Amino acid sequence: MDLENQQRIKDLAEEHGPENMLVILGGAEAEASGLACETVTNGDPTFAGPLAGVQLGLACYHVMEDEIKDAIDDDVYEEQISMMEMVLEVDDIVEEVKEYREKYSQYTL
Amino acid sequence: MMIVINQIKKERRGGGNMFEDKKVAILGDRDGVPGPAIEEAMETTGADVVFTTTECFV
C-alpha cells in the first residue's frame, strides 16, 4: 500500500478514532486486496511505511462483499460497481480480505 | 421496483443505519473499482466519506 496513503489512514484513525473508521477496498486482485486489509488492521507487513508495527485493527471490507453491497443503493451499485464484478475473481478477493479481517480487525460494522 | 427492493433491504437492516456514524476511507484500484465509483456508492449508505484515493495495487 502506498506510503502516503498509509499516513493518511493513520492520521484519520487518530482524528476520528479507529472504532469509527471503515476502510473500503476496490482492489482488482485477491492478494493485493488482502495485503491492503492486513496493512490497515495489523500494520504494514513490508515494514516500509508509517503503518509498520501499527495495529490499527480497522474494520475493512472489499466493496463487493455482501455486508457492503447489500447496503448500497441497487441502482448506484449497478451503475458504478457491477461491471467490474463481472470481470474480477470476486470469491477469491472476498475470501482473502475476510481472512485478514477476521484475524486482525478489532472493530466491526 | 428498485425503490421497493431498497426499502426491503433497509428494513432487513432493522431500519437503522449501521453506516451512519462511520467515517469511510476508500482505497480504490485503477485496475479494479476506482475510488470515485466506490465513493458514489458508499454515499448512498449514509456513511461519511472522509478520504478517497485510487491506487495502483500491484
Image (cartoon, rainbow, N blue to C red):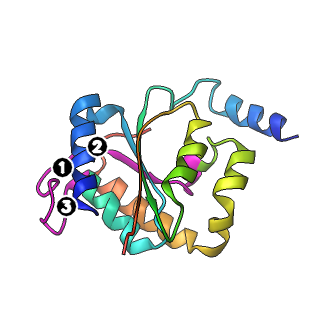
| SS for callout 2 | loop
Mark 1 = which residue? Answer: A55
Quadrant holding the N terminus of chain A: bottom left
Query: What residue is at 57 percent from the left and 57 percent from the top?
Result: A64
Is B9 colored magenta in this rendering? no
Is A50 colored magenta in this rendering? yes
Badge 3: residue crowd in 10 Å (few <14, some 14–19, many ≥20) = many
Q: Which residues are magenta?
A: A41-68
Amino acid residing under circle 3? Asp
Describe residue A101's horizontal placement relative to residue B21 as left or right: left
Query: Do residues under tags 2 and 1 come within 8 Å of each other at their CB atoms?
Result: yes
| SS for callout 1 | loop
Amino acid residing under circle 1? Gln
**Mark 3 falls within which chain?**
A
Describe residue A53's horizontal placement relative to residue A73 as left or right: left
| SS for callout 3 | loop
Q: Earlier in the sequence, mark 2 or mark 1?
A: 1
Please give the label number shown on residue A44.
Answer: 3
Q: Earlier in the sequence, mark 3 or mark 2?
A: 3
Query: Residue pushed farthest right?
Result: B1
Q: Which of the two discs, 2 and 1, sits closer to the camera?
A: 1
Please give the label number shown on residue A106.
Answer: 2
Quarter of the image holding residue B55?
bottom left
Amino acid residing under circle 2? Gln
Q: Are marks 2 and 1 on the same chain?
A: yes
Badge 2: residue crowd in 10 Å (few <14, some 14–19, many ≥20) = some
Q: Are marks 1 and 3 on the same chain?
A: yes
Secondary structure character of the magenta stretch overall: loop
Q: Residue B25's x, y, as percent?
A: 39, 44
